[in-house]
Every structure is written in structure tokens, then in C-alpha cells.
Image (tube, rainbow, N blue to C red):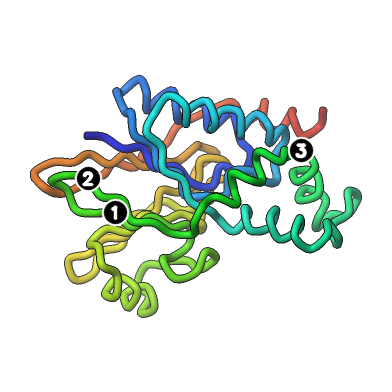
């Protein structure tokens, strides 16, 4: 059994398609998405089309990131406060106005955290930031992170949000940060995600780093 874990796409449909193509080529049929599907980059609708298409063909698990809360809160509050020409909120305004009601209903249906169970293998807690808060970062060598790991019912937590791939181990438990598909930090301009493989009643992980057409992503912002 192999699972692809993807987080923080932020509307980078080009990087997303690259990651999905790679996963499918290697026989992966289970996909876990950790939130922040759109935002910042151009053509959010293309990202959502890819996600819906994948959802129809494969076994997929989805949770909310903090960006999904942005879109839902903006709608709930009467669509006030963002301005197209504002340097701070302009990209939020653009993304929101390119989402459909189907997209918003999809985001609304998602939870902030979930537990996934597979026969023979340890359960997986999936979250965007931490199991406690969507915008909380699980950081290495951090006492708060260690406390959260100790409180967690599973020995594996999968997260994103920091945009930095990495592993944290503490008292027999593991946090795996999938990194960012769309806007990776310290990632040399590459798309990052995680592959898990079940083996001998445990999970073996591999951090994936892929080159993609960054120039096309930049070009899209000017069209």
C-alpha cells in the first residue's frame, strides 16, 4: 500500500499535476490532501478541476487548511474587507471570485483534522497545522510540539502549513510534514510532497521533490 500526501497547493495547478502524474506512474491510488488548495497563484479553478477529477478516480482524503477558512469566513461575513487593488488582500479577492459555489460547499464539508485507519498499519492523524489548531506549526525541537505528540492517540501525525518538508521524532512518535506542492520554502523552486508505504505493520516514508515549469506559473500571473 502506497499513499501520496500533498499539502499547500495554493493554486499551483502546474506543480500539482506534476506531483499527481508522478504518484500515479508509481502505482499510487490513495491520496491525502492537507489543505490550502488555492490562494496566491493564478487560475484557482484549474486546481479545483484537477482535484475533483482525481477524487472521482481514486481513493482521496481531504481536510481544511487555514485558506479554506478564509474563503468560508469571507462569504459568511458578507464578502467585505478585501479589495482587488489592495496589495495585501488582492490575491485573496481574486481567488475568492474565481471559486464556484461547488468549491465553497466542498470546503465547507471538510473537517480540520481526521484519523485514517488502514488494516494492519498504524492509524494516521492528518491535519494542516496541528491536530489542535489549523494555523499552528509543528516545529522541530519545540516543547509544544512534543506535548502535542505525546497527547496524540496515533504514533503518526501528517501535517503541512509551514511549507517546509521534515520529520520530527519524539518518544516513539513521528510527525511528517509533507512540505508544499505549490509554494515551497527552502525548496529550490521544486514541488514537494510525501509518499508513505505500509511495510511490516509500520509506515515507511519518502520525501519527494520535483522540478516543474516555474516560468509558466510566473507567466500566468501576468495574463
| 168 left or right of 82 in image | left
Mark 3: secondary structure: loop
Q: Quick one: label 1 or label 3, which is nearer the N terminus?
A: 3
Q: Is residue 177 above or below residue 52?
A: below
Residue 19 locus on image (x, y percent): 45, 30
Q: Residue furthest right?
A: 85
Mark 2: secondary structure: strand
Tell me what residue is drawn at x 49 percent, y 37 percent: 191
Q: Residues within 10 Å of mark 1 (few under 14, many from 20)?
A: some
Q: Residues within 10 Å of mark 3 (few under 14, many from 20)?
A: few
Tell me what residue is drawn at x 59 percent, y 48 percent: 107
The residue to which callout 3 is attached is 98
Q: Is residue 186 above or below residue 196?
A: below
Q: Quadrant of residue 155?
A: bottom left
Residue 135 locus on image (x, y percent): 55, 65
Quadrant in which the C terminus is drawn: top right
Residue 152 locus on image (x, y percent): 29, 69
Q: Quadrant of residue 15?
A: top right
Q: Residue furthest top?
A: 25
Check contact, mark 1 vs mark 2: CB within 8 A.
Answer: yes
| 28 left or right of 71 in image | left
Tell me what residue is drawn at x 29 percent, y 75 percent: 151
| 211 left or right of 173 in image | right
Q: Quick one: label 1 or label 2, which is nearer the N terminus?
A: 2
Q: Mark 2 and mark 3: span between their CA atoms?
A: 36 Å
The residue to which callout 2 is attached is 118
| 122 left or right of 223 in image | left
Q: Mark 1 and mark 3: span between their CA atoms?
A: 33 Å
The residue to which callout 1 is attached is 124
Q: Is residue 130 above or below residue 103?
A: below
**Viewer-nearest of labels 2 and 3?**
2
Q: Quick one: label 2 or label 3, which is nearer the N terminus?
A: 3
Amino acid at each position: 500500500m502506497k499513499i501520496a500526501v500533498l499539502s499547500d497547493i495554493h493554486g499551483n495547478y502546474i506543480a500539482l499535476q506534476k506531483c499527481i502524474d508522478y504518484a500515479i506512474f508509481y502505482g499510487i491510488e490513495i491520496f491525502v490532501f492537507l489543505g490550502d488548495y488555492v490562494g496566491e497563484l493564478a487560475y484557482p479553478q484549474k486546481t479545483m478541476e484537477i482535484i475533483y477529477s482525481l477524487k472521482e478516480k481514486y481513493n482521496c482524503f481531504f481536510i481544511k487548511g487555514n485558506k479554506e477558512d478564509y474563503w468560508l469566513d469571507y462569504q459568511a461575513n458578507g464578502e467585505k474587507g478585501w479589495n482587488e487593488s489592495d496589495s495585501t488582500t488582492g490575491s485573496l479577492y481574486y481567488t475568492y471570485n474565481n471559486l464556484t459555489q461547488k468549491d465553497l460547499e466542498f470546503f465547507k464539508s471538510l473537517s480540520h483534522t481526521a484519523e485514517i485507519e488502514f488494516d494492519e498499519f498504524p492509524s494516521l492523524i492528518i491535519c494542516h497545522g496541528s491536530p489542535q489548531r489549523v494555523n499552528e506549526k509543528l516545529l522541530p525541537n519545540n516543547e509544544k510540539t512534543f506535548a502535542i505528540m505525546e497527547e496524540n492517540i496515533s504514533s503518526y501525525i501528517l501535517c503541512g502549513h509551514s511549507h517546509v518538508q521534515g520529520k520530527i521524532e519524539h518518544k516513539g512518535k513521528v510527525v511528517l510534514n509533507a512540505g508544499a506542492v505549490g509554494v515551497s520554502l527552502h525548496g529550490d523552486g521544486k514541488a514537494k510532497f510525501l509518499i508513505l508505504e505500509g511495510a511490516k505493520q509500520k509506515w515507511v516514508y519518502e520525501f519527494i521533490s520535483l522540478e516543474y515549469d516555474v516560468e509558466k506559473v510566473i507567466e500566468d500571473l501576468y495574463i
